[in-house]
Amino acid sequence: MEIWTVSNQKGGVGKTTTVVSLAGLLAQGGKRVLMVDMDPHGSLSCYFGLSPDDGYPSVYDLFERFHLKQPLSPENLLHQTSLGCLHLLPSTTALVTIEKKMGLKDGMGRVLQLALGEMKDKYDYVLVDTPPLLGVLLINALAASDKVLIPVQTEFLAMKGLERMMNTVHMLTRSLGKEVDYTIVPTMYDRRTHASTESLRLLRQQYEGTIWPAMIPIDTKFRDASQAGVTPSQFMPSARGVRAYRTLLKHLTIGSLSVSKQAV
């Protein structure tokens, strides 16, 4: 089982879209995939029709069970999507209370890692959506991950958020005692605007060697797919955004630095 965390300490850069797009492609390719929503805002959960305010079984239950020294039993918290081999461990707004209610006792930063360890034979891939704030939820996601994907909108303010995220990655590298394997993913690219093209140029210049050589374009089909509650590759396999994520997935799974030129 391989665990990918999708994270950035700035909202609105395409984290949830990246999780859903890659998870859908993996599932349609025959892989057993779990999505985990660690964000109290619950964008990933809402995508699949689950409101974070409804009180259904969620990630919060894992922390509560750990706090009460009960079995984590994550299997009974999962939600089925319209793809048979694609499941969701949803979020809830109660996640914002974890640190206040339960404190930060030993092991609290590895609850997700422990829970996923109980399901290591059930899934091929786990993709984790994260909140844009540094705290116990983000630490859990990063501690559990084998690979970190950092979506960055190709605009200047998003690049400032990337600096904060990189500081967090380097800090956790030291505290966890392991190298964090990360890939920066340029998103929401609009070749018609100078701001977008210049931001992409600067990203490639400053983060050479850790940035994916291509980019995810602006595509209204992402929004349409979310309204339909299905993955973008289910909604329109030929959409340019889906083609871009398919290229990214090939890059991530094959590990090749040679990426075919995209039409965006």
Image (tube, grey):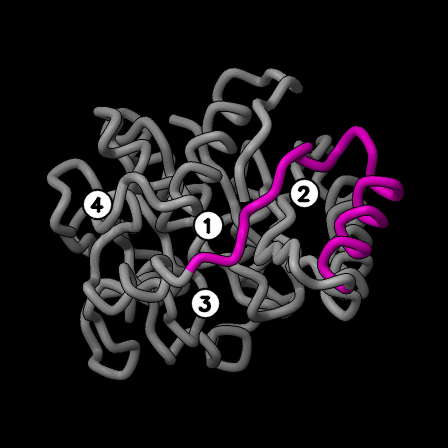
- Which mark is in front, 4 or 2? 4
Measuring 52% from the left and 59% from the top, which residue is drawn there? 14
Name the residue at 57% across, 58% down: 188
On screen, 58 above or below 216?
below
User: Label 1 sits on what residue type?
Assistant: Thr
User: In this rendering, would 103 be left or right of 31?
Assistant: right
Q: Does residue 170 appear anywhere in the picture?
A: yes
Q: Earlier in the sequence, mark 4 or mark 2?
A: 2
Q: Quadrant of the N terminus?
A: top left
Q: Which residues are magenta?
A: 195-219
For marks 1 and 4, give the CA distance. 14 Å
Of circles 1 and 4, the one toward us is 4
Q: Secondary structure at mark 3?
A: loop
Answer with the quarter of the image where residue 228 lies: bottom left
Closest to the camera, between mark 3 and mark 4, is 4
Provide residue 211's location: percent of width, then percent of height.
72, 37
How far is mark 3 from mark 4, CA to CA? 24 Å
